[in-house]
Amino acid sequence: MNRKILWLALGLIFFWAVPAGADTGGAVSPADTAWLLVSTALVMLMTPGLALFYGGMLRRKNVLGTIMQSFFILCLIGIEWVLWGYYMSFGPDQGGVVGDLVRLGTSLAGLEPRGTVPGFAFIMFQGMFAIITVALISGAVAERMKFSAFFIFSLIWSTLVYNLLCHWVWGGGWLMQLGFLDFAGGAVVHISSGVSALVAAILIGKRKGYPEKVVRPHNLTMTVLGTALLWFGWFGFNAGSAIVSGGLASLAFANTFLSAAAAGLIWVFIDWARTGKPTVLGICSGAIAGLAGVTPAAGFVSPNSAIIIGMIAAIICYYGVSILKPRLGYDDTLDVFGIHGLSGTWGVFAVGLFASKSANSAGADGLFFGNPGQLLIQIVGIAATWILAGVVTYGVLKILDAVMKLRVSEEEEDIGLDLTQHSESAYTILE
Amino acid sequence: MNRKILWLALGLIFFWAVPAGADTGGAVSPADTAWLLVSTALVMLMTPGLALFYGGMLRRKNVLGTIMQSFFILCLIGIEWVLWGYYMSFGPDQGGVVGDLVRLGTSLAGLEPRGTVPGFAFIMFQGMFAIITVALISGAVAERMKFSAFFIFSLIWSTLVYNLLCHWVWGGGWLMQLGFLDFAGGAVVHISSGVSALVAAILIGKRKGYPEKVVRPHNLTMTVLGTALLWFGWFGFNAGSAIVSGGLASLAFANTFLSAAAAGLIWVFIDWARTGKPTVLGICSGAIAGLAGVTPAAGFVSPNSAIIIGMIAAIICYYGVSILKPRLGYDDTLDVFGIHGLSGTWGVFAVGLFASKSANSAGADGLFFGNPGQLLIQIVGIAATWILAGVVTYGVLKILDAVMKLRVSEEEEDIGLDLTQHSESAYTILE
Amino acid sequence: MNRKILWLALGLIFFWAVPAGADTGGAVSPADTAWLLVSTALVMLMTPGLALFYGGMLRRKNVLGTIMQSFFILCLIGIEWVLWGYYMSFGPDQGGVVGDLVRLGTSLAGLEPRGTVPGFAFIMFQGMFAIITVALISGAVAERMKFSAFFIFSLIWSTLVYNLLCHWVWGGGWLMQLGFLDFAGGAVVHISSGVSALVAAILIGKRKGYPEKVVRPHNLTMTVLGTALLWFGWFGFNAGSAIVSGGLASLAFANTFLSAAAAGLIWVFIDWARTGKPTVLGICSGAIAGLAGVTPAAGFVSPNSAIIIGMIAAIICYYGVSILKPRLGYDDTLDVFGIHGLSGTWGVFAVGLFASKSANSAGADGLFFGNPGQLLIQIVGIAATWILAGVVTYGVLKILDAVMKLRVSEEEEDIGLDLTQHSESAYTILE
Amino acid sequence: MKYIIAIIQPHRLEKVLRELDNSEIYLRTVTQVMGCGRQKGVTEVYRGNIEHGNLLKKIKIEIAVNENYVEPCVQALIKGARTGKVGDGKIFILDLPECVRIRTEERGGLAIG
Amino acid sequence: MKYIIAIIQPHRLEKVLRELDNSEIYLRTVTQVMGCGRQKGVTEVYRGNIEHGNLLKKIKIEIAVNENYVEPCVQALIKGARTGKVGDGKIFILDLPECVRIRTEERGGLAIG
Amino acid sequence: MKYIIAIIQPHRLEKVLRELDNSEIYLRTVTQVMGCGRQKGVTEVYRGNIEHGNLLKKIKIEIAVNENYVEPCVQALIKGARTGKVGDGKIFILDLPECVRIRTEERGGLAIG
Ligand SMILES: Nc1ncnc2c1ncn2[C@@H]1O[C@H](COP(=O)(O)OP(=O)(O)O)[C@@H](O)[C@H]1O
Ligand SMILES: Nc1ncnc2c1ncn2[C@@H]1O[C@H](COP(=O)(O)OP(=O)(O)O)[C@@H](O)[C@H]1O
Ligand SMILES: Nc1ncnc2c1ncn2[C@@H]1O[C@H](COP(=O)(O)OP(=O)(O)O)[C@@H](O)[C@H]1O
């Protein structure tokens, strides 16, 4: 009942807050718009792709729980973004910290084009990033977090972490002013979600039976499909972040592909050397590590650097997932920190090494191209992101746990989240 | 054997009927063409997406039956469209009712560009709409209709309902002349298929055991994947309907996303309030309802209106599916009427309320923007679509039932359509 | 251990060999670039699509083995391509046989734009073709080839067959000089992989139990999904091969769709007539046959010809798969030769019949348009491709078999490739 | 006590369960099995080749009952599963000397219900 | 010899297997089944309609043992499977007159272990 | 009558069914099960961690026969399933006091075939 009132209220707010009217800016380029709209669609597909990537690795009884979190975030943060997220992130800068806060609840007469693309295309493109960032976190708390708690957490996290960070890095905030480079979201998306995932996994605690009982992926083909959709969508993510079509988008496209390919190969080779077998989950994990690692660098480095970034991303994440995690003993169910957190951190750092003005004259040179200062800036950005994400996640989860409890009961965990949180089963057995 | 002759004959016709030669119109815009081709590919993907969306909700023994219908329609109506569908729909208007009829069987020297896009791009884009409209109907008769009957039905229905309606609304027919607004197919696609689905479900009768026995989705992850592909493809459906790239396409894109997100949220909240649980099938159903609802409005309304349209679409469809259907007692297997029929009707109506020239100056104003006349026109269009679709479907199915029977035998229904109609099983059990 | 050294060495080579720097050519068209980048992403998606298409037809115990081969190829050949494949294929012609060989290991200062598209877009687009061609072969040796052997084979095959052929046909080699027409890879992709698949299937020998034991697809819905992704991606494959956006891309798009639709229909009708049932695997097989068949012709023929090409492709492949293969008795597991080999050969031949300057003035006229010479050229191209692919595949596999054995042990074949090659199972049984 | 194993047609499951309920037999264990009996197997088509398989999907129901419930149980099974066509299935009745309820450690006739 | 059939809760499987190991009973066959007993079935929601199903996922464990292992085996099963809540399951103990090891063609008590 | 339960390797199923056919035993029920016996379990790798599972995929075949068919049936099972390696499986033979054919309500030896 309270919920009904809530969304009725929200409904009324929508009417005022959301931009009206199509763009008529003369500067709009049909080619750039086409590219950005396609990229937006590609990035949108990543969230269901992530749902499948994650879902395949879980037990049958918890598949829907995690898929639901991704799908719900797609809707929830999609609306949050046009209500206040976009304005907080890209509104006129307020002291380097945040964009427009008062815009919440007032009507916009229309979105102006951003450069050569319509405002609606830009707001949607950026919104997809806000969505997938939150969805990523769900992998760390899979198989045990209450849906209601995740719902409230997402809304607060997106507002306090994502929107701020997005403003700092891309919306004119202090990190952008400092010259911090993050092409498509190594810090904004991957470090922020990865670090928050780590904090959440630790706070919520291990799953029953972990680590004695190993949960094997219930359907690896689903994870493979998810990987394929993520990789496909990542072209929009990274190459779309050029916003305009042309040479820079092509460079980012090539870098994205090559880093993923190199990382996939390296992971397989390490697996082969260490365990005697090249694994499918290994190549998928490697590819994702390579994609996350190259994200901040895609438009700033040359393809040879992208390949090296991917290779090292695979090595770091392999280490994080197979050696560090078991040693430290936390239960980050699907290795959100081990893959996105570590690879994102490495990628942002790598920009400080490999960035080169010969690749992108609007970027900067990194250490290897004679500019050690950029590396320092990158380290500042990494530290800021770790701190913001870690501290806010810790605080929010602590409060939420006190208020509503984060975790399902032991019995619910036994029965599984699908039945207990959603009254559904992913598969029938008999027909 | 008769079939062989049939397609040999068809083969010969192809040679003459299908347009030859690439377009060389000087006005072609590469950017608009790129956008339209991508949109066409996206809409093409919706039909397999629908097959998975539907297939996941059925029993294991009937999955392939419904998937086959979608895939077969993709091929069949694809060819029908270039043979006569396109000319009936977009050929020179004949008294407001139909386009070019004589074109069937004569050769076209080449398709002229339509505006800034090549004729081949336009014919393909429109063809994908003809395809998915028929495929949608298959959900209502799932688990019991004979494949052969569905085959003949589709061909006749597409010719007599879709092609006429498409001409009326988009091809220069009387509804278009009247000023009826349907941006991407609320009436042409969703009302027409939804109403026909209702008629078909009633005529064919309930499945054995319905409603005592509830058929649970055999694989909800398949339905989730289908939803994702539909949503992804819908960007091409709605934003591609701008035909050109730019501000209007971006507006339609944003409206599409926001309506789906809002409808998904609302459905989940209603579910939560009524049944105590937020469900995955609920969020998928809501998103599809929102997508169907915003389809006629995507390019005519502002995003705040799109959100409201989505919210109301979810409420109406939830009511239709969970309360109206059980009460009326018909067996529309996968709620084609409850989702597409109702949401399409609402969306077309909503254009008469929310349309605004400030959103699209080539559109019109609706009731809320001071023009009650538009609402009347929309109601006329709704009525015309309901009547055309309902009457023709009724007539065609009655005749087909007399000639060849629509429904499989009771024993075949027990064994399932996969084995009895296609001699295949979707899954092996032992290996 | 040797492997570690190998990839360390490779890693160092990368640094020099891979092009650096973004393109700044003034001639770059944002619209064409957007189209080519989207097409590249679409073609990339085809390889995972193929993995699912293939995987669904296998037994549960061998699914991952084949999926892994596709995914691994995506990474491996992706890197091979930027290291030496691209230069061998598209570098300055050396006597009609091969491009630039010395480029291996030297650094490129930057890729120049190719026509109106950035060099990075072009290299990536072409790379996706190199990838899927090798991946196609994996279907013929499924369920019994060692992963390590497939790995080495791919690298050599891609270098000696694909890169040469690509140069001959598209990179300025002798077939191109001769006027051989292959729009998007009938010879380069489909004949080469199909013929090699046949040779490989014969050399490796039949699976245990073949042909007495029929292996039924373990999950036809996976094959359906794979077909959908392949078809979707094929728009990028064929229409993207126009490289620029506009009328030619639209023609190729329409031809692609219509050939697939016609072939799907015909296969279903033959199935229906011969076996009494229209099958889902039949429509999928038909569509793929139609897509492969129209590939070389997509930009050279008119849509009516494309439909006829598709229809005949379906007839030929149906015959090859259902009659020829059982009669000859070889075990081409997933009919790579029967579909891609035969359909590719037919398509390249058909260009010699149906090509028409009225469809594409930059193409040629075929036999039916008064130019029998083109047919001769096409036959020369077919013969050259068959010979190159057949001979090299035979030689390479013979040597590899002697060195490392191609086939898993009988016991491993019993247990399945997933467990024995990759220590993974696709699905858990209990949870 | 007896341990009753019935193999039935999958589409009769609902009906059989209802008949068992009517006979006040509420406890049972259901498994998906493949059967091969007098019934002709299914025909499947694979790329133009017609194959006659001989394993059909069946449902196995296991019910442990006290002696006085054996006949009612068999009658309920027959009532629910019988269509009169080949493939209806079989009922196998085994002796069950002992039974334990895990929750309470009760044994024998007490544990079975 | 006895043929022991136990129906347990899926999430107790790990624990039961461990207890069996502790009792040195290493041989067993595990099947996924659906059960219907005293435990209330699950509630599922389908497009706004609430449905009460009555078949629950269960695990069936079959173990053939010599007489002297029957009691240890039953105890291990109980120890591993018992939560004290309805739904814990049952153990059925049948007589097993004969047993053959396929590999060696050994018969009887020798074959069972 | 006897109720024969055999646990075999999945990849021997085809061969076993053929041998049963050869011995004119056409009726059977097949189930997918997981087994744990003397055979070493499979090793799986999960994100760099090597895990030794101990449940292996097996096939269970159930055959109800009249006494005179017991030995032929056991021989056919052995012939079809035996590879001589650990993991070949077991055959369990239970007494079957009663059997009913649902279609005809025949009982006993008549019903079994
Ligand atoms: N003697 C038997 N042993 C094991 N299973 C049997 C036996 N007889 C029948 N079944 C099972 O019962 C199913 C139905 O039997 P079938 O002979 O087809 O029907 P009917 O009893 O009507 O002749 C078979 O598919 C098989 O699973
Ligand atoms: N008499 C029986 N016959 C067959 N299966 C039974 C019988 N009693 C219990 N079962 C199986 O055991 C499971 C647990 O039984 P239940 O009655 O729910 O638990 P409890 O033994 O704690 O009362 C059931 O779901 C069913 O599968
Ligand atoms: N005593 C038993 N109780 C239940 N199942 C058994 C028993 N012994 C063997 N099995 C089943 O038979 C399978 C094969 O047995 P195993 O001991 O591996 O082979 P072998 O008989 O060649 O030694 C096991 O995986 C298990 O499923």
Image: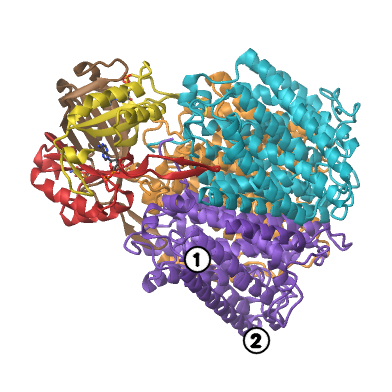
Chain colours: A cyan, B orange, C purple, D brown, E yellow, F red
Kindly identify which chain the residue marked by label 1 belongs to. C
The image quadrant where one finds ligand 2 is: top left
Left or right of C321? Residue D97 is: left
Q: Amino acid at mark 1?
A: Val
Which element is circle 1 on? helix
Q: Quadrant of the N terminus of chain B?
A: bottom left
* Callouts 2 and 1 close, C-beta under 8 Å: no
> How far apart are the two marked residues, 2 and 1, measured between alpha carbons?
30 Å
Mark 1 within 8 Å of ligand 3, using the beta carbon: no
- Say above or below: D81 vs C154: above
- Between label 2 and label 1, give the one nearer the viewer: 1
**Callout 2: few (<14), some (14-19), or many (20+) C-alpha neighbours within 10 Å?**
some
Kindly identify which chain the residue marked by label 2 belongs to. C
Q: Which residue, as the protein is rendered here, is positioned at the far left?
A: F68
Which residue lies under the disc numbered 1? C336
Choose the circle earlier in sequence order: 2 or 1. 1
Q: Splitting the image into 4 quarters, where does residue E36 fall? A: top left
**Callout 1: few (<14), some (14-19), or many (20+) C-alpha neighbours within 10 Å?**
many
Q: Which mark is residue B198?
A: none
At horizontal 19% and vertical 32% (from top left) the residue drawn is E66
**Residue A403 rendering spot, x and y as whole percentages:** 64, 13
Which element is circle 2 on? helix
At horizontal 72% and vertical 59% (from top left) the residue drawn is C12
Left or right of C102? Residue E38 is: left
Which residue lies under the disc numbered 2? C373
Q: How many marks?
A: 2
- Say above or below: C111 vs A399: below
Q: Amino acid at mark 2?
A: Gly
Asked if badges 2 and 1 are on one and the same chain, I answer yes
Query: Is residue B169 something that shows in the picture?
Result: no
